[in-house]
Amino acid sequence: MTEAPCDKSVTVMSAARMRETLLALAAALHEAGKGRDAGVLVGIQRRGVLLAEELSRISAEEHGVDLPVGSLDITLYRDDWTSGALKPKIGRTSIPFDVEGKTLTLVDDVLYTGRTVRAALEALTDFGRPGRVELLVLVDRGHRELPIRPDYVGLSLTTDKHDRVDVLVASLDGEDGVRLTSDRLRQTG
């Protein structure tokens, strides 16, 4: 038997666990919001928006709290979009509420270097000045390049820089879950 490195994926969060995690995150948002305005959710395109919509739905059903949802495309705020390697595809931004003075929770699927969040914070300044900005991520995989820390985390995952973490959402991918792809995973045979 030899052990050889290979590019292999493993499920690190099943659909059922993802549902439980979103329920727990919605409960944490509810607890944090007691005694202040309920706030608003702004999902970072693309999967962050879908997660924000699901958190809003759960908040309404489980806690009777309406959390309006906006979507934010950060393409033109990225610090690498002019490098030539990227061909920017502009997504939709829709902030259908006034952010001025509100508690705003940015929602993203995976937190990695922090550069996406930095771009989102810059993009938000075009819409006003929230009273407070929080960050909610489904997965925090570490390797920050900027001093950014999430307020709410569904799963903290230890990864190598070359690993890939994919959040799957049924409406886009046909299933819910989180997969880790890494050449550290070994296959025997």
Image: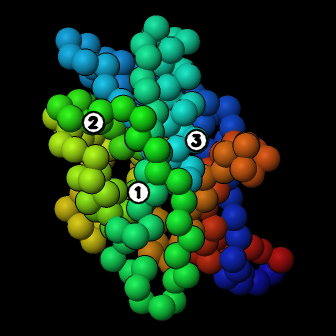
Q: Amino acid at mark 3?
A: Leu
Callout 1 secondary element: strand
Q: How many marks?
A: 3
Question: Mark 1 or mark 2: which comes first in sequence?
Answer: 2
Q: Can you name the residue that lies furthest to the top here? A: 64
Q: Of discs 2 and 3, which sits in the foreground?
A: 2
The residue type indicated by label 2 comes to Val
Classify mark 1: residues with Cα within 10 Å, few (<14), some (14-19) or many (20+).
Answer: many
Write the residue at 45% across / 10% down: 63
**Among numbered discs 2 and 3, the one appearing first in the sequence:** 3
In the picture, the disc for residue 50 is 3
Element under label 2?
loop
Mark-to-mark CA distance, 1 and 2: 23 Å
Q: Are marks 2 and 3 in contact (CB under 8 Å)?
A: no
Task: Tell which of 16 and 83 is nearer to you.
Answer: 83
Q: Position of residue 10 (x, y in %)?
A: 68, 58
- Observer able to see residue 4: yes
Image quadrant occupied by the N terminus: bottom right
Tag 2 residue? 99
